[in-house]
Image: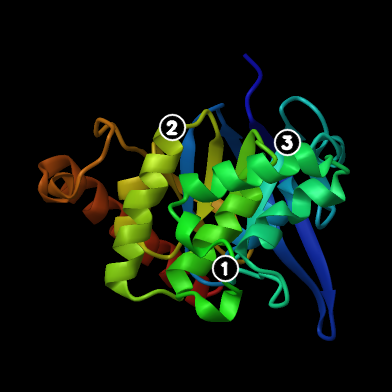
Amino acid sequence: MTAAVVARELSVTFESGGGQFQALNAFNLTVEKNEFVSLIGPSGCGKTTVLRCIADLISPTGGSVMVNGIPPRDAIKKRDIGYVFQSATLLEWRNVLKNVMLPLELAGVPRAEALPRAEAMIERVGLTDFVKNYPRQLSGGMQQRVAIARSLVMNPDIILMDEPFAALDEITRDDMNRWLLEVFAQSSTTILFVTHNIREAIMLSDRVVVMAARPGRIVKEFKVSMPRPRTAEQTFTDEFSRIRQEAEEALYGAATRTKVGE
């Protein structure tokens, strides 16, 4: 079976006022279909750059990326990829229903088909009672649900999520984690998730990948074998504690190497 995402020897170099800055170097990652993988690492380690290469928002200066066995640009044309940003990026002048319908409209889907698809997705994220509300009338967690519904409405094979819950308080964030686990369990979607929160990464993921910066690269991976559906009680298990401790040690080591310029 073709993997959902394959990055091989991926390198990205940016030009800046002080010269060239290498964001990624020899980055290698394979994400299997219907796998939930989280990227964690110190700020500036290239996590978002990885997502942007996969989404064809930037072009790598070396190496390659394949999505479902084809280049990212072709995968975007086939609408195989959904992207959820840290900010919900909703259109303030469109209500919940119209925000979720936007990708369908842009794809030329007839309204008779687009409307029930959008309504079904809104129901799936638990916002049926808010279809006429505008973004300013929603909480931060609700806005992110709308953003995720907008990404899911095109039925993408792969969803890229760039710290979507970072701006939320801890209680709301935990609620969103539980909700995302339910969404993932009900779909055949592959998710590549960026976060700074180790607990969140372990709770959500099948695999946690730790990155170091300057230039960005993978320094360690952890397989999370806790059974699904995941529950809050699993955060107190020996496996969870072991992975968390090892991930924290790897992350601290990565941050330390970054500070000393290694």
Q: Are marks 2 and 1 in contact (CB under 8 Å)?
A: no
The residue under label 1 is which amino acid type?
Answer: Gln
Toward the viewer: 43 or 218?
Answer: 43
- State whether residue 25 is above or below residue 183: below
Q: Is 137 displayed left or right of 237 in the figure?
A: right
Determine which quarter of the picture holds residue 115.
top right
- State whether residue 231 is above or below residue 16: above
State how far apart marks 2 and 1 are (Cα).
23 Å
Determine which quarter of the picture holds residue 58.
bottom right
State how far apart marks 1 and 3 are (Cα).
20 Å
- Across and down, in percent, residue 210 comes to 45, 52
Quadrant occupied by the N terminus: top right
The residue under label 3 is which amino acid type?
Answer: Asp
Toward the viewer: 56 or 247?
Answer: 56
User: Considering the numbered disc 3 on the image, is that residue within a helix, a strand or a loop?
Assistant: loop
| Visible residue check, residue 40 | no
